[in-house]
Image (cartoon, rainbow, N blue to C red):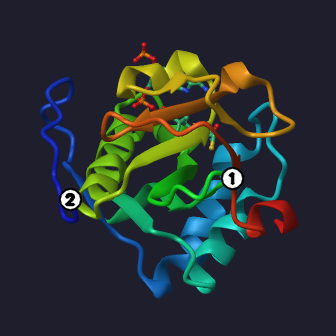
Amino acid sequence: MTGATPMDHAHPHRAPLLIRDLRADDADARDALITRAFADTPHASGTEAAIAAALDTHGIASVSLLVERDGVPVGCVQTSPVSLSDGTTGWHGLGPIAVDPACQRDGIGTALMTAALERLRSLGASGCVLLGDPAYYTRFGFAADPRLVLPGVPPTYFLRLAFGDVVPSAKVRYDAVFEAG
Ligand SMILES: CC(C)(COP(=O)(O)OP(=O)(O)OC[C@H]1O[C@@H](n2cnc3c(N)ncnc32)[C@H](O)[C@@H]1OP(=O)(O)O)[C@@H](O)C(=O)NCCC(=O)NCCS
């Protein structure tokens, strides 16, 4: 939900988070945020900021959210439609997601994940996939599933969350901007 201000029960004196749609004038701050967040991340490609920019510039992103604390951007997340080889539509890929390293482990990533998934559901999406560490994403309902395959990646790290009862059997392809970076 845009403008959501989740209560910070663990830190009641901390300014609330404001989650909102990304605006064009956020581009530079978002770029710097993603670059900082991925700088020390294993498996980072170094192209995450360029991918995020391309998703917005070309109108590919289905969800593009920024989270602010005290007016300062501290995190961002995007989703974009993915193609399924069986022709099923309505599935989206989540990523990149990034939280400023100075603010990590404080619930901001959780707030962003929750907001992005809520938005996808409100858009009528059928499901969401992502490439990530199951230790983090299973808490949001994501799970590896042999029916959905992202060629070339370890299956245990390719995770799905269906919003309905149906999980297609298909190969998944992200938009070409993820390859170009
Ligand atoms: C992944 C990321 C968005 C999480 O944001 P965050 O604000 O730190 O997350 P939260 O505070 O909501 O959650 C923290 C919890 O997640 C765990 N966690 C965070 N990243 C994790 C990871 N990569 N693998 C496993 N657990 C992870 C923390 O240990 C902590 O666990 P706890 O709640 O049991 O203590 C953030 O760490 C980040 O920006 N990382 C660098 C960029 C990245 O790797 N993005 C994901 C790939 S697209």
- Which one is closest to the eye, mark 2 or mark 1? 1
Residue 70 visible at all: no
* Marks 2,1: beta carbons within 8 A: no
- For label 1, the residue is 85
- For residue 104, above or below residue 67: above
Tell me where residue 145 appears, x and y as whole percent.
58, 23
Q: Which mark is residue 1?
A: 2
Toward the viewer: 72 or 163? 163
Give the CA separation, mark 2 to mark 1: 31 Å
Q: Classify the position of the C terminus by image quarter.
A: bottom right
- Mark 2 residue's CB less than 8 Å from ligand 1: no
Q: Residue at x 18, y 34 (%)?
A: 8
Tell me where residue 113 appears, x and y as whole percent.
38, 42
Mark 1, residues whose alpha carbon is within 10 Å: few (<14), some, or many (≥20)?
some
Q: Residue at x 19, y 64 (%)?
A: 3
- The type of residue carrying mark 1 is Ser
Report helix, strand or loop for mark 2.
loop
Please identify the quarter of the rendering in which residue 50 is found: bottom right
